[in-house]
Image: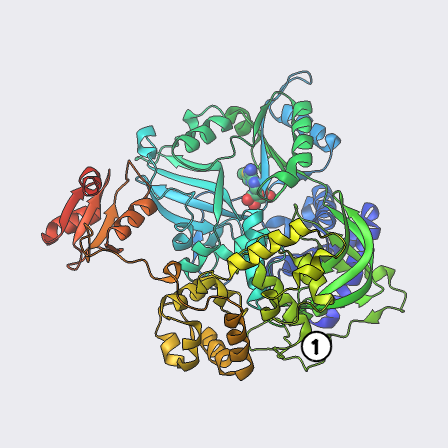
Amino acid sequence: MYSKQEQAHFNDQTKSLLAQKDHIKVEQLNELRAALVYHEWRYYVLNQPLVADFEYDSLYKVLEKIEGDHPQLITPDSPTQRVSNDLTSDFNSVPHLVPMLSLGNSYNLQDLQDFDTQIKKLGMLGEGDDVAYSVEPKFDGGSVAAVFENDLLVRGATRGNGSEGEEITNNIRTISSIPLKAAFSKHNIHKVELRGEVLIQKENFKKINTQREEEGLAVFANPRNAATGGLRMKDPKEVTKRGLVAFIYQLGLAEDEKGEDQLKKFTSHAQGIELLGSLGFKVPTAESKLCKNIREVFEFCKYWEEKREDYEYEIDGMVVKVDSLALQEKCGYTSHHPRWAIAYKFKAKQATSTLLNVEYQVGKIGSITPVAKIEPVQLAGVTISSISLHNEEFIQSKDLRIGDRVLVERAGDVIPYIVKSLDDARTGSEEPIKFPTACPSCKTELIKAEGEAAWRCPNFSCKAQVLQRMIHHVSKDAMDIDGFGKSYVERFYQMEYLTSFADIYRLPYAAIARLEGFGEKSVKKLEAAIEKAKSNPIYRFLYGLSIHHLGKKVSKIIAENIEHVLDLQNWTLEDFTNLKDVGPVVSQNMIEFFAQPANIELLKEMESLGVNLKQTDADKPFEVAEDAPLSGKSILFTGSLQTMGRKEAQEKAKQAGARNVSAVSSKLDILVVGEKAGSKLKKAQALGTVKIYTEEEFNALFE
Ligand code: IVH
């Protein structure tokens, strides 16, 4: 949308606007608007913001102020005249039942006190009166609206431009913290629109990125991007894999059957949230507080600012809401935000440093990761000196150069991140970053596969890769050799005790016992752990080979289907792809691995050192006895079960020999009905061929 020149122009202009932000004049109104529109595009469309949130906010506030002073100058396309936008053409647009507004921002006690004063004015209260506020975290994810009608979840939508969003019902339905059915009708509510935020746990975010890095895919900059990206994926099955969670924090609309407003029957915000909690929604009860006055609000915000690191989700501030709904009504709304609520934004964990150098790390499948070495800086209590730059494209998109001053950020306790270089500080002596064309370790020319973000070293014997593969081989998920950590592998590798996988199983224990930091006892322990690992099931062994795209799951599937690892020498591409869940890419990689004589030699060498290559009981598929109670039957659970969860029930049925299916058809043998079973039960009854069990009857099969 913007040419390179235009972008350069807006970047310069933003700098000068920020520098003079307290003195911007009415004459600069258009310039200011154009710059804000440009940064919205960078943020929402490209997902590559160039300015920090607080910088954008400060310019936005200036615009609001000028427009407030000169309302006749407001144009319909001014950034203040709409709320931000995440619409694309991929999903259907749907209008929200009630517009989803934004929030005003505050950054300190003074801002909060100004807000409190304003509320008192709007509510016609005295200066000395206290207003009670409901204060809850400002979750940093993707906002959604969920509509329930007749107790059923009928629609889910993103926030979009505030008036309309994208219809993502199927994806919302995969989020387990949103019930598909909730008893609103018991409270005379027929139709309701709920607002909430969809998030990913920080821990889960790290796992997703590690896996993406392994697969050569671009990593997410932060949990928010991973969550909002997840919401807008085409395949709901893929959405499920992201492990999304939704906090509900607001009732947008509630009506009875005649369309009469039912929000009126609540007296406070907290009451509405409590109802939602009792109906099975995830609400921020434990995280929020009803504060007696604005002082208490400030204390609570400070308390959370400290605690934010340890909290399992990303939050970027607190939301302060007038608790009384009567007072909320008196306050009303602007076109942009409710006057009865404000966000208290935490200080961004940002600092500036100098980019000293870029080093290139080689991963276990040869992926090259550029790592920025920066002058050490303190960021939220941690000293940071290295930051991953992910891949070549990341460096290019930020136009980073050696010697640049850079803005560094840590969102939550997640990995630090380079936001941008500070072009203003450039002296002209900065050097462009030259991404290598050859492997930094073995000098082999790098390659890049279609659809992958990473350059890779294709040399399987590359020393740097061998080291990474050995670290992976002994790790918990692979051969799980207790006490054999990364630092041992590195040390033994440097001493040349370790040059290949085989060496792991013939370490010179006597010599190691004489090394500094080792003793008889610790070496004996290491030896015992290695000896034990020799008889591991072969799925661990296969996974430990670090074959590109061969994950834990496929390793297990393959292990189920072979008697000996070396059988794979004779497998064809079809033999692999015929297995369920084994794709053509990993199959081809397997074929290539087992076609290399050197690899076969290595496997044989390991076997001669006592490493098990034969299928063990732990590798075998789970077998069901012929007399198992549900052997060969297809089964489906419907309605809500009382004595166990749905997953648990399905697992129980599987263990008893049944196959779980997802729909009622003439092929279905058994339908187990829990409480409030609906159309599935009716359909099964109509078919007349399906055996219908209550939960009790199902459980009795196992007694
Ligand atoms: S209340 C009408 N509560 O912050 C009230 N919003 O800038 C408006 N957000 O996109 C929202 N946590 O998705 C509210 N506890 C919370 C929130 C919250 C996060 C998001 C919301 C919106 C943005 C407002």
> Is any atom of residue 628 visible in this view?
yes
Find disc 1 in the rendering and name its residue.
439
Q: Residues within 10 Å of mark 1 (few under 14, many from 20)?
A: many
> Is any atom of residue 34 visible in this view?
no
Q: Residue furthest left?
A: 688
State the quadrant of the C terminus. top left
- The amino acid on which the numbered mark 1 sits, given as a three-letter code, is Cys
What's the colour scheme? rainbow
Quarter of the rendering containing residue 634: bottom left
Along the line of sight, the residue nearer the viewer: 304 or 656: 656
In this rendering, the answer to whether 590 lies above or below 235 is: below
Along the line of sight, the residue nearer the viewer: 642 or 463: 463
Residue 1 coordinates in the image, percent (x, y): 63, 69
Residue 307 coordinates in the image, percent (x, y): 65, 35
- Measuring 73% from the left and 55% from the top, which residue is drawn there? 51
- Measuring 62% from the left and 53% from the top, which residue is drawn there? 524
Along the line of sight, the residue nearer the viewer: 689 or 267: 689
Residue 509 coordinates in the image, percent (x, y): 66, 60
Mark 1 secondary-structure assignment: loop
Left or right for 433, reference 611: right
Quarter of the rendering containing residue 537: bottom left
* Ligand 1 found in image quarter: top right
In this rendering, the answer to whether 172 lies above or below 122 is: below
Left or right for 339, reference 282: right
Along the line of sight, the residue nearer the viewer: 431 or 657: 657
Number of callouts: 1
- Measuring 53% from the left and 65% from the top, which residue is drawn there? 544
